[in-house]
Image (cartoon, grey):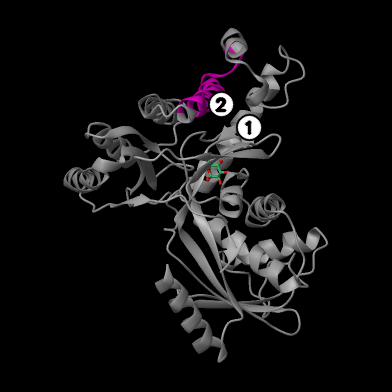
């Protein structure tokens, strides 16, 4: 972490010829349970992790945002007064990486908040496209920076919602609130149980003696964005069809498992599978929380395993490498549960492992995955970290 702070502050100095005024840290997240349910008003259980986006920031006169992505060595300047056109200060179409920053500026401005000119350099150790919310971390980092520069205040959840609006309406991915929420509201040593309908949450201490291990398959999702939007539309279709027999339902959150079983025949096979995953996953997450509270790692882990099978067979967002990583992990000593995390189609798995066996687990899983997949994975124990802040 301190290495990335030095990197980003040194890059700021050499880019702009002056020191940064401050650095923001905004973490990625890993989701323990509750996958693809946030946009169905369900419950999710993410933790903010000790991998983060670091943004070195300096105030600037005027309306220009000069931003640099250190990791890809690219820079863009855009005007905070002409964000709808999605163009840089020279009138060229905004590069996709810059749309996260510009989208946040747009969203904050839409909410009537002042967005000042700035100079910034970003670096991150959240791997991109790996299911750990690298883009939400970037969005939350910029929102935190503009909040600091503007001297205005906004509760962390509102900041997260502004970032989600940027992602939905500016970047064009119809994602739920989970990622931005976790990055903005994380708490060290805790998982966050969020009710995505009421947007209230509870911090649950992670039991001692357990390790959360993230395993990156090194496969990057290609179809991620478009398939994600398709899944979301299928859920809406299910609500529409079920609404004829279950009047008043607003989302799949309102459909009890028994009612779903009674009426699932009204849905096409594919939409029925998608909706079954969501209805069961909302129920599963609530049961899992009870188990977590009572320290039942075996029971909790079993529900993680069930979740993976459901994402693979019903929601169909897994891929061969994720399935391999999960089945190898589940066969190792000390592993309570393993499943893909995030949107899917590649990226990472999350594993709940006995702390005393985490080191052996990590080593053995690396060897086994590499042997079969022919790719060296990145596997590490992660810590639950605090949410975004000026550091
Ligand atoms: C992505 C989205 C989240 C959530 C997950 C799946 O990470 O950004 O809102 O829907 O996928 O649970």
Q: Quadrant of ligand 1?
A: top right
Task: In the displayed orientation, state which residue is furthest to the top.
Answer: 262
* Ligand 1 lies under 8 Å from the Cβ of mark 2: no
> In this figure, which residue is indicated by the disc labeled 1?
40
Measured as percent of width and height from the top left, residue 308 is found at 40, 31
Task: Give above or below for 89 relative to 375.
Answer: below
Q: Please state which of residues 332 and 270 is positioned toward the viewer in this rendering.
A: 332
Residue found 72% across the figure and 52% down from its top: 158
Image quarter of residue 320: top left
Element type where label 1 sits in the image: helix
Residue found 55% across the figure and 71% down from its top: 55
- In magenta, the rendered stretch is 264-291
Res 71 seen here: no
Task: Give above or below for 132 relative to 247.
Answer: below
Q: Report the label total.
A: 2
Residue 16 is covered by the magenta coloring:
no
């Amino acid at each position: 972490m301190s290495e990335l702070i030095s990197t980003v502050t040194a890059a700021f100095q050499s880019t702009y010829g002056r020191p940064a005024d401050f650095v923001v840290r905004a973490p990625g997240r890993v989701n323990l349970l509750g996958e693809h349910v946030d946009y169905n008003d369900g419950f999710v259980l993410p933790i903010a992790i000790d991998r983060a986006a670091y943004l070195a920031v300096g105030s600037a006169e005027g309306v220009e945002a000069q931003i640099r992505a250190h990791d890809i060595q690219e820079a863009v300047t855009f005007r905070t007064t002409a964000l709808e056109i999605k163009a840089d200060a020279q009138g060229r179409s905004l590069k996709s990486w810059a749309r996260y920053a510009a989208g946040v500026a747009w969203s904050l401005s839409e909410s009537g908040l002042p967005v000042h000119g700035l100079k910034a350099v970003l670096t991150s150790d959240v791997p991109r496209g790996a299911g750990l919310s690298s883009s939400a971390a970037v969005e939350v980092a910029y929102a935190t920076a503009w909040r600091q520069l503007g001297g205005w205040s906004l509760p962390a959840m509102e900041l997260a919602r502004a970032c989600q609006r940027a992602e939905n309406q500016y970047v064009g991915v119809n994602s739920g609130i989970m990622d931005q929420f976790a990055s903005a509201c994380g708490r060290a040593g805790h998982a966050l149980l969020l009710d995505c309908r009421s947007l209230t949450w509870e911090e649950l201490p992670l039991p001692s003696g357990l390790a959360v291990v993230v395993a990156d398959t090194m496969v990057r999702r290609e179809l991620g964005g478009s398939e994600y939007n398709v899944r979301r539309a299928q859920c809406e279709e299910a609500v529409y069809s079920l609404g004829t027999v279950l009047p008043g339902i607003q989302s799949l959150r309102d459909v009890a498992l028994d009612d779903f079983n009674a009426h699932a025949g009204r849905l096409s096979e594919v939409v029925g599978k998608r909706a079954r995953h969501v209805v069961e996953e909302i129920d599963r997450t609530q049961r899992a929380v009870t188990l977590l509270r009572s320290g039942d790692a075996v029971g909790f882990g079993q529900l993680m395993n069930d979740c993976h099978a459901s994402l693979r067979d019903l929601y169909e967002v897994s891929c061969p490498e994720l399935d391999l990583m999960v089945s190898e992990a589940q066969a190792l000593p000390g592993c309570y549960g393993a499943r893909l995390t995030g949107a899917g189609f590649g990226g990472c798995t999350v594993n709940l492992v006995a702390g005393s066996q985490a080191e052996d687990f990590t080593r053995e899983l690396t060897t086994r995955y590499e042997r079969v997949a022919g790719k060296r994975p990145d596997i590490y124990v992660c810590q639950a970290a605090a949410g975004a802040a000026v550091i």
